[in-house]
Image (cartoon, helix red, strand yellow):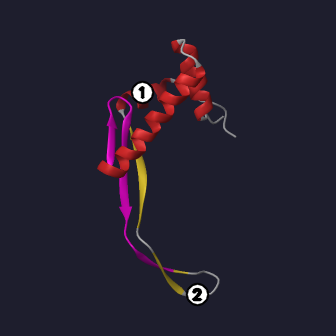
Amino acid sequence: MTSTKKDIVKEVAAKTGFDLASVKEIVQTMFDAMCEGLSRDGNIEIRNFGIFKVKSTPERKARNPKTSEIITVPAKRHISFKPGQLMKERINAETPREER
């Protein structure tokens, strides 16, 4: 099952005792700050959690499989995530869930 932002807000509110509206605003502000930091600095490191890093893919030539036409795929940026040691340990300590 996938956790959504709404699920995170509910869980944080339950653990902290704060109201849902306040927690929702705080979580959204954190996500906004992370997006802004990635676009400005190119990476975010959260100790014991992981590293978010913006990586660039250069422009390249590709072939359209239907027409065999060679096209140029523009350069783009994408985000990669490398989990921290503590996160790896916690994930591996959990019991594996059933595969779908």
Q: Which residue is mark 1?
A: 89
Separation of residues labelled 1 and 2 (CA atoms): 47 Å
User: Is the C-beta separation of discs 1 and 2 under 8 Å?
Assistant: no
Task: Looking at the picture, tell me which residue is in the foreground, 95 or 69.
Answer: 69
User: Callout 1, which amino acid?
Assistant: Glu
Residue density around tag 1, few if under 14, some if 14–19, many if 20 or more, within 10 Å: few
The outermost residue toward the top is 17
Answer above or below: position of 63 versus 92. below
User: Callout 2, which amino acid?
Assistant: Ser
Q: Which residue is mark 2?
A: 68
Residue at the spot 58% in from the left edge and 21% down from the top edge: 11
Answer above or below: position of 1 versus 76. above
Residue 74 located left or right of residue 40 = right
What percent of the width, then of the height, locates residue 80? 41, 49
Please indicate, yes or no, whether residue 64 appears anywhere in the rendered image. Answer: yes
Please indicate, yes or no, whether residue 95 appears anywhere in the rendered image. Answer: no
What percent of the width, then of the height, locates residue 81? 41, 44
Residue at the spot 63% in from the left edge and 30% down from the top edge: 97
What percent of the width, then of the height, locates residue 77? 41, 60
Magenta span: helix, strand or loop, mainly?
A: strand
Magenta residues, as a range? 42-62
Does the magenta segment cover residue 56?
yes
What percent of the width, then of the height, locates residue 35? 42, 45
Residue density around tag 2, few if under 14, some if 14–19, many if 20 or more, within 10 Å: few
Residue at the spot 37% in from the left edge and 53% down from the top edge: 54
Residue at the spot 50% in from the left edge and 83% down from the top edge: 71
* Disc marking residue 60: none
